[in-house]
Image: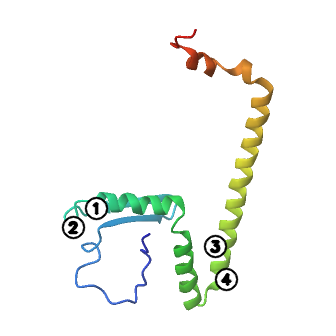
Amino acid sequence: MFNFFKRKNKPEPELKYEQSNIAELSFVVDMSGDTWVECKWDASFSDSAHMYFAELLDNVSSGNMLDSALEFVREETEREGRLIEYQAILTYLSQTHQERMSLMVADMMDNMTNTNTSTKDSLVVNPSDILNRGHPHE
């Protein structure tokens, strides 16, 4: 797994930041609250740069990097004396996660109710009809 979260106070490499990265993915929220995404990969650095980007995108979108990101945010807010903001971030993430889970469970329960009451009536094609087509024993 990648660990892309770096502190700005570390010494800069000899190459410029943009020139030394194989793949980048960034999100920015503007003053209107709109989220913008920027992505790029440097094929001149590696023939498989697009695959590094794919791995980065997968790690970000699947939540695999959340622990690293939150640890980075905690360290930075602690260093800057702003832990109350970190706590607010954690509270927000917890609440939105609980809301998503509640909606998912409600949808699953609704689907179970709908499935149990009218499964036979709602099917356009019975799956067993498809499976039985073309069998010599018919």
Front residue (pair 136, 84):
136
The mark tally for this picture is: 4
- Is residue 33 in sight in this rendering? no
Q: Amino acid at mark 1?
A: Ala
Q: Position of residue 32 (x, y in %)?
A: 52, 60
Looking at the rendered structure, the secondary structure element under dot 4 is helix
Q: Is residue 61 above or below residue 79?
A: above
Q: Earlier in the sequence, mark 4 or mark 3?
A: 4
Quadrant assignment for the N terminus = bottom left
Q: Amino acid at mark 4?
A: Ile
Q: Earlier in the sequence, mark 1 or mark 4?
A: 1
Q: Is residue 121 above or below residue 100?
A: above
Residue at point 63%, 73% (across, down): 89
**From mark 4 to mark 3, how far is it between C-alphas?**
9 Å
Residue at point 19%, 64% (across, down): 44
Q: Amino acid at mark 3?
A: Ile
Residue at point 72%, 59% (across, down): 98
**From mark 3 to mark 2, how far is it between C-alphas?**
36 Å
Where does label 1 land, which residue? 49
